[in-house]
Image (cartoon, rainbow, N blue to C red):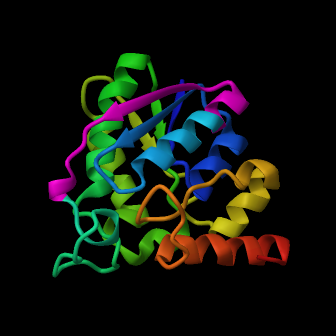
Amino acid sequence: MKGLLLSGGMDSIALAWWLRPEQAITVDYGQLAAIAETRTSRQVCEELGIGHTVIDARCPELGSGDMAGGAPHQLAPVPEWWPFRNQLLATLAGMKAVQLGVTELIFGAVRGDGSHADGLPRFFEDLNRLMSGQEGGLNVTAPAIGMSTEELILKSKVPRSVLAWAHSCHTGELACGDCRGCYKNAEVIANVYGDL
């Protein structure tokens, strides 16, 4: 059974539409946009008839930068960097995935996520080796890791009306229009649809 780590952003929505996993898991780890991400994820799952679980594991004191509402850590490669975020998400979602009978946990990573180490293909290869070798044999995949967000959207054929639900802002429940997530959203929409 396939399970998708669904953040409510453009990449994970496109993957949900394209791959139609049986389960989706959203993690509230204390990020400022958690309410909007959860609401969006719930809406996508209802539209597609996907089972949806929300994990409440808030730990905002461990965050950094835009996503945590503070200054970026000195090691931060980008303003929204949260230390070991994908590793944390994989562990929490993986724990629930095994309970649900999921055998493949899908991440919505794309080529542009390579600005931080846990967005690179090697990270997901290492993560898959680690998690698939443990009880439950959970495989971790990132099927869009070689694609841009634009390529993923076109491949998935996700309708614009569904993609419009995406919450990409890093700083809160409403789009600020001034963070890297909001910039990416506007740029992708312009590139794919030719307008803002």
Q: In this view, does 76 lie above or below 174?
A: below
Give the residue at x 27% y 63%: 68
Q: In which quarter of the image is residue 57?
A: top left
Residue 8 position, x and y percent, is 55, 48
Camera-side residue: 105 or 14?
14
Quadrant into which the N terminus falls: top right
Magenta-drawn segment: 44-62
Residue 103 in magenta stretch: no
Q: In this view, does 99 lie above or below 111?
A: above
Using residue 54 as the reference point, say whether residue 8 is left or right of it.
right
Using residue 74 as the reference point, say whether residue 162 is left or right of it.
right
Give the residue at x 28% y 67%: 69
Camera-side residue: 124 or 86?
86
Camera-side residue: 2 or 48?
48
Residue 92 position, x and y percent, is 29, 36
Q: In this view, does 23 lie above or below 140?
A: above
Residue 120 position, x and y percent, is 41, 67
Residue 53 in magenta stretch: yes
Numbered label tally: 0
Q: Quadrant of residue 138?
A: top left
Residue 81 position, x and y percent, is 30, 70
Quadrant into which the C terminus falls: bottom right
Using residue 9 as the reference point, say whether residue 19 is left or right of it.
right
Give the residue at x 28% y 49%: 30
Give the residue at x 25% y 24%: 135
